[in-house]
Amino acid sequence: MRANAAGHMSRFAADPHARTALERALDDPEPLVRGVAALRLQPGSAGAREPAPLLAKALADPVRTVRFGATLSLLNMGINQIAGPDHDRFERAKQEVKAHYEIVTDDADEELNAGKFYYLTGDSDRALAAFRTVEKLDPRRSLDYFVGSVFAQKGDFRSARKALSQVVPKDPYYAEAQKTLKAIAGKSSP
């Protein structure tokens, strides 16, 4: 129940009380609570503590689920490298996440998460391969935003524009696709 509550509290990160409770959940005696807190802790409102140091500390947790959540949260915040004493822990945790995704290649949701992970770590080729696998496993799923983002990351702006322009207005990533299209407008592929 506490893990479930931690997950729900993340929707109220702007509330200082909810934010403090989520930060405290990183030290909960129950690993599942720590794991959910690590996965859901993101930058909050002005005045909130910076979550990166708290998540870097979670990289030393003895439970892999907690390290996994902290790694994904750091990557989602745009942190791909950590300097200092947490560097090696972060690199090991990224390898653990990668090893997990190499095992679960027959599940569309896990492959989608793998594609996002590879995209956030800058491995465009593996990200694209994971998204293509999702298309095979679940042809009804819209992946144009993700595929277009990978092409933009690779510098293939023509392919990126083609994929991103196929994102329909009802797609939850439509606004992001439009923003990316504006950002790459006029850029040419090598």
Image (cartoon, rainbow, N blue to C red):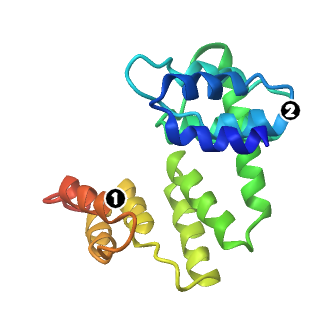
Left or right: where 166 falls relative to 143: left
**Label 2 vs label 1, nearer the camera:** 2
Helix, strand or loop at mark 2 = loop
Q: Which amino acid type corresponds to the residue marked 1 in the rendered image?
A: Ala
Which quadrant of the figure contains the N terminus? Answer: top right
Residue 164 versus residue 82 in the image, above or below: below
The x, y position of residue 44, in whole percent, is 45, 29
The x, y position of residue 49, in whole percent, is 50, 17
Q: Which amino acid type corresponds to the residue marked 2 in the rendered image?
A: Glu
The x, y position of residue 105, in whole percent, is 73, 69
Q: Is residue 122 visible?
A: no
The x, y position of residue 89, in whole percent, is 72, 26
| Residue 152, disc | 1
Q: Residue at x 66, y 72 (%)?
A: 108
Left or right: where 39 falls relative to 11: right
Which residue is labeled 2 in the image?
30
Helix, strand or loop at mark 1 = helix
Q: Residue at x 86, y 32 (%)?
A: 30
Within 10 angstroms of label 1, few (less than 14), some, or many (20 or more) residues? many
Which quadrant of the figure contains the C terminus? Answer: bottom left
Lower sequence index among marks 2 and 1: 2
Q: Residue at x 46, y 76 (%)?
A: 142
Judged from this view, the residue extending furthest toward the top is 84
Q: Which residue occupies the foreground of this view, 156 or 65?
A: 65
Q: Residue at x 40, y 65 (%)?
A: 172
